[in-house]
Image (cartoon, grey):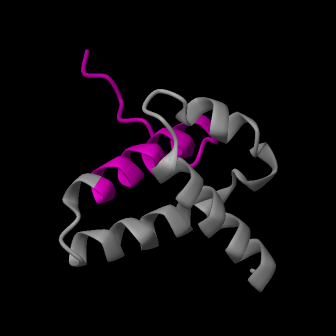
């Protein structure tokens, strides 16, 4: 991953953290070129850092975003339904 790409990921994460509640989909939709496995990995790295810095709410938020994006991108396996 290139350094500028990593910076773009971190800038997008920062934008997500600062945007008004409920406008996260708009932020993500305006940055679709960055929505990939590398971005999800960056989300998890920042979430881990936040958890270690005693910011559990921020960590939970980023993990939620990462999980939702991974599902949408087909990177998160769906659990089989019990029938």
Of residues 59 and 20, the one drawn nearer to the viewer in this rendering: 20
Q: Position of residue 12 (x, y in %)?
A: 63, 57
Q: Horizontally, is 78 left or right of 7 in the view? A: left
> What residue do we see at 35% from left, 35% from top?
79
Q: Quadrant of residue 1?
A: bottom right
> Residue 54: percent from the left, percent from the top?
18, 71
* Outermost residue to the top: 83
In the picture, the quarter occupied by the C terminus is top left
Query: Where residue 44 sits in the image (x, y, percent)?
Result: 43, 65
Q: Bounds of the magenta span?
A: 58-83
* Residue 52 position within the rendered picture, expressed as x and y whole percent measured from the top left: 23, 78
The picture quadrant where one finds residue 40 is bottom right
Name which residue lies at 54% across and 68% down.
Answer: 42
Please give left or right for residue 60 compared with residue 30 in the image: left
Whether residue 48 can be seen here: yes
- Residue nearest the viewer, comparing 41 with 3: 3
Q: Is residue 38 visible?
A: no
């Amino acid at each position: 991953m290139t350094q500028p790409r990593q910076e773009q990921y971190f800038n997008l994460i920062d934008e997500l953290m600062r945007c008004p509640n409920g406008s996260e989909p708009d932020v993500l939709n305006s940055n679709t070129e960055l929505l990939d496995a590398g971005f999800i990995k960056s989300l998890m790295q920042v979430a881990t850092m936040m958890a270690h810095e005693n910011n559990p709410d921020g960590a939970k938020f980023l993990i939620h975003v990462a999980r939702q994006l991974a599902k949408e991108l087909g990177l998160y396996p769906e659990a089989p339904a019990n029938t």
